[in-house]
Image (cartoon, rainbow, N blue to C red):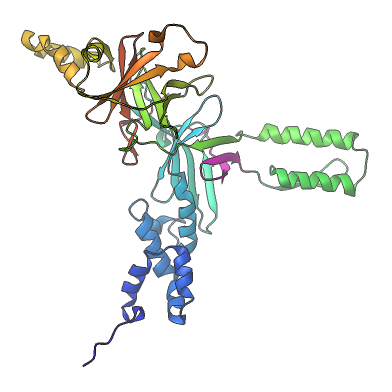
Amino acid sequence: MANQENSFTDFPEDIQVCILSFLAPSEIATLACTSKQLGSLCGRDSKLWFSMCQRRWGSKTRITQWGNAKGTISYRHLYNTLHHWENFLGFWRRSGLNPLLLFFEWGPSFISASRVSPSESLAYGVTKTPFLWMSLSEEGDVVTFLDPDGKPDGERGLQSELIAVDVSFMGKTHFVVEEKQFKSFISDDCGDEVVESGSPPEKLKAEIYQHFANRRSPGGDRSRRQRRREKERLARRKWESQHFVKIVNCSPTPERPLQGLWKGICNDRSLAFYLVGYDDIGGISCRRIGDHPKYAPFFWVSNATFLESPFPPEEESLYAGRVHVRPLQPVNETLEQFLLLDDEVMNGIQEVRISENVVNRILHIRSNYDLGVPTGNPKSVEGRIWQYQDGTFGFGFLSDNLVVHMKPIVHNGFIVDTVKAPAN
């Protein structure tokens, strides 16, 4: 008996759907043109497109709960929406003098953005407060609300009000948040119907129409009334437009081990965020997120060539004699630890603390202060990065005799050491 080859359409439908769920939408569209049977299968929203959504995002969000779980939105539309919104995931910083840090993540039936800031508990904790909420209505329309106060749900008072906003991409690494403006038709003092809208194109059309359709002195009362209405519209605005830029490389890689977002304890024992980036010619720069009045480098180096072990004696002495900046422990916990320690253990505390971080490599750096007026003393701006075996690092300058230990803010796509925001 001759062997008979089976075609793709001979497989059970569930197997066909499972195989097709690995394809991209453009490939599905091409396949649908090959035969009537495949065209019918590719157009089944509840099977194929649901399987595509479930395979791609099922482990991150609950596909069946989008659109208030009413089943009124198509999974093809949901796939295209989530594919577009997936670019939001990760860290963004606000453009301007005070660069607010945002973190987008999946929710059960929405995508949310949280303000991320250093905790005030004098530890490595990271505080997350609500900022933005994006989802789909039962009709499939985009619904986006902004929390101007940033209070947790349990602490939001009756006076707190969510603001409806529009979020628009400007490229893949830039988006703008604007308050949603609803069109309304009102009559002015002369009985003419005027279109009032917050959208610049619609408002411009209304002004052009009024200027050419009713030629009353443009500089007279009508012009003053238009300016008054514009001031009233601006006074009703609850949110000023803000622009955000994506932090593309927020985690280290084997080729760029210092890259990403880090957190470290400052000299005053407060926690600060740092962004370390590599340039195209092998240099490294570190910027402190939240610096005021400008987003300025904290340290930099033009050649990221590490000094490997074994180290010269002067380098070992330079690290061993420095003060390690660490978060303060609670008083009760500190007293309890000291009461339980004997003299022999107490004498070995300093040795244990030094050996906690085994230095793997050393990199010479320079402070940001020499980017302006040269000081004439190279030691005042010269410093070191000590990379440890666990992948973290510390840095310090020859002028301060300190080591600031850096820990990553995010690991495997999640923020580590998250603490609850303090209640007011």
Closer-to-camera residue (113/321): 321
The quarter of the rendered structure image containing the N terminus is bottom left
Please name whichever residue, 256 or 46, is drawn nearer the observer in this view of the structure. 256
Q: Quadrant of residue 211?
A: top right
Residue 256 lies, in percent from the top left, at 34, 35
Quadrant that contains the C terminus:
top left
Residue depicted at 51% across the width and 36% down the height: 245
Would you say residue 193 sits in the magenta stretch? no
Compared across the picture, whether 246 is left or right of 250 comes to right
Given the current orientation, which residue lies at the most extreme bottom position? 1
Where is residue 344, by image quadrant? top left
Q: Residue at x 77, y 36 (%)?
A: 229
Residue 123 appears in the rendering: no
Q: Which residue is more in the foreground, 164 or 189?
A: 164
Residue in view at x 46 percent, y 44 percent: 88
- Which percent across, then down, holds residue 355? 17, 19
Specify whether 234 is left or right of 52.
right
Q: Is residue 171 magenta?
A: yes
In the image, taking residue 46 as reference, residue 339 lies left or right, namely left
183 w.r.t. 149: above or below:
below
- Compared with 42, 91 (above or below) is above
Per the rendered image, the range of residues in magenta is 156-180
